[in-house]
Amino acid sequence: MIIGPNYVYIALPRTASLSVSSWLIADHAGRTFDGHYHSADVPRECRDHLVFTVVRNPYGRMASLYRFLEQKFWGRSDEWCETAGMTMPEFVRWCIDRPEPNWQTQSQILSAYDGRLAVLRFEDFPGCLNVLPLEVGIGVPWMNRTWHLENPEEILTLDSMRAIEDHSRDDFEMFRYAIRGIAGSRKHLQRGVL
């Protein structure tokens, strides 16, 4: 969570959170709150601030998290390597019920906050930030970009999409993203690699 003079940003993993956080810290007097970067437990004294977050289509978010681990951590000897070699459906199922924010759904993380929340969409990034009462200036840096597709479900297998839908059902509903796994185009699903 990043707290500024008149705003609180709840950072969700794999939603451009490092980019937004860096921009807020550099250009808008933001600071990380007590080292709780992916927390939605907004301090009582900040409840009257603008509280906002950025959400991402669950297909793209989980595919991005999988690719991030594959590119940055597999082959190393640390806790993140437990996922090394998993298929995408195995990885999504592994994420279920893990307490760390990286593995939780967006709605699980945000459930700690019960106040007014401005929800911006990653798919509109960085333009979505223009609705904030903050000057965007020369722009937001795109940091830690590992993988992005306009339509990530085009490269997911039907099994991967079903696993993501099971894992992130509340996110699809809460943030009004379309579930495409069963009704999606078979042509795209046959090209899947994850």
Image (tube, rainbow, N blue to C red):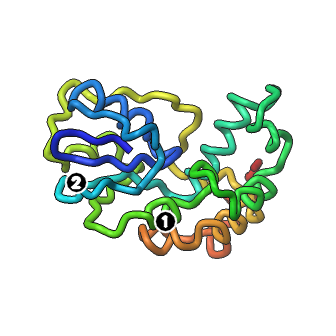
User: Is 60 or 114 nearer to us in this picture?
Assistant: 114
Above or below, 158 against 27 in this view is below
User: Is 75 or 110 nearer to us in this picture?
Assistant: 110
Instruction: Name the spot of residue 102 as percent of width and height, x first.
Output: 60, 48
Given the current orientation, which residue lies at the most extreme right position?
85
Residue at (69%, 58%) from the top-left corner? 98
How many marks can you see? Answer: 2
Q: Quadrant of residue 130?
A: top left
Q: In the structure shown, which secondary structural element does the residue marked by tag 2 occupy?
A: helix
Q: Quadrant of the N terminus?
A: top left
Q: Is residue 71 left or right of residue 24?
A: right
Earlier in the chain: of badge 1 and badge 2, it is 2
Q: Nearer the viewer, mark 1 or mark 2?
A: 2
Q: Is residue 31 left or right of residue 191?
A: left
Residue at (27%, 59%) from the top-left corner? 118
Disc 1 residue type (three-letter): Ser
Q: Quadrant of residue 181?
A: bottom right
**Residue pointed to by mark 1:** 107
Label placed on residue 45: 2
Disc 2 residue type (three-letter): Glu
Residue at (69%, 37%) from the top-left corner? 69
User: Is 111 or 22 nearer to us in this picture?
Assistant: 111
* Contact flag, marks 1 and 2 (Cβ < 8 Å): no
